Amino acid sequence: MTADNHPAAHASAPGSPHASAQTGGDLPAIELRLEDARAGYRTIEVLHGITMAIPSGAVTALLGANGAGKSTTLRVLAGLIPLRGGELSWRGEPITKMTTTNRAKRGLMLVPDERAVFATLSVRDNLQVIAEASGHPDITPALEAFPRLRERLSQRAGSMSGGERRMLALARALLARPSVLMVDELSLGLSPKVASELFAWLGTVADAGTTVILADQYTEEALALADMVYVLHRGEVTFAGTPAELGASELLAAGTPS
Ligand code: ATP
């Protein structure tokens, strides 16, 4: 079955441990829907007409090798680069032309990488700024989620390790109370222990009802966390389904004589 005619590409019904929002029946609500999306940079088209249905309150993993188009897909969802063709809707409402700022105001949040912090500000100020902007000035939830940051409150963010900056970026995202949290390459440059902690944290975020979209290499941890998987290859969706279905399709491919 190709990605385009997989039911998941249209209505997506993962047997999700995280999915909480239900439309009635057994189908989870769709948070974001990309239809035949095309996008790129200058003269180069990178996404060649991708279709995705991102379920609400669940973890969706965008997997693929370097250059597959995962970050570009997240940028399209965040509104950082425009669609050149196709449609994007959010809970059924077309948002193809909605600005990045308006998407962010309405709770769509992208954590691109560890640079998503103010390097010259202290950890406390990094947290305080976003907490105040969100109307809930208490930074305690971030410190409870990431106790290591409590020891670093006075430290300048730019002088922390990549893993700590990543934690700070995620802690800031938590304080912004997003309805959709998109994280690009969570595990990049992190020790396996820190990466595991952060993956586990993302699972709790989805359990609390937030829609999580994770772009990553093809890692076991991303697969273990995901309710729904899209595999991208050279700007096209080559698989859409649950992690279990992905496992089955790989076995099938491995057993298919060439
Ligand atoms: P990676 O893990 O390497 O980031 P990815 O799957 O996230 O991989 P993208 O970053 O979306 O892939 O890149 C897809 C293609 O778009 C690549 O060929 C890349 O060189 C190109 N590309 C990405 N960002 C830009 C940019 N700002 N300007 C021009 N081309 C870009």
Image: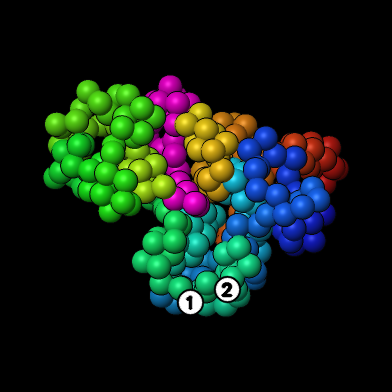
- Ligand 1 near label 1 (Cβ, under 8 Å)? no
Marks 2 & 1, CB-CB < 8 Å contact: yes
Mark 2 Cα-neighbour bin, 10 Å: few <14, some 14–19, many ≥20: some
Examine the structure image and report whether residue 186 is included in the region drawn in magenta: yes
Q: Image quarter for residue 2?
A: bottom right
Q: Where residue 71 appears, x then y in whole percent?
A: 47, 55
Q: Which image quarter is the N terminus in?
A: bottom right
- 53 relative to 154 in the view: left or right: right
Pick the front one: 59 or 127: 127
Residue at point 61%, 51% (across, down):
56
- The span picked out in magenta is 178-199
Locate residue 38 relative to residue 162 in the image: left or right.
Answer: right
Q: Which numbered dot is residue 94?
A: 2
Camera sees residue 225: yes
Which mark is on residue 97?
A: 1
The amino acid type found where label 1 is placed reads Lys
Q: Residue at x 62, y 32 (%)?
A: 224
Q: How is the image coloured?
A: rainbow
Q: Secondary structure at mark 1?
A: loop
Which residue sits at x=57%, y=73%? Answer: 94
Q: Nearer the viewer, residue 180 or 52?
A: 180
Whether residue 34 is visible to the viewer of this picture, yes or no, is: no
- Give amino acid for label 2: Pro
- What secondary structure is found at the residue carrying circle 2? strand
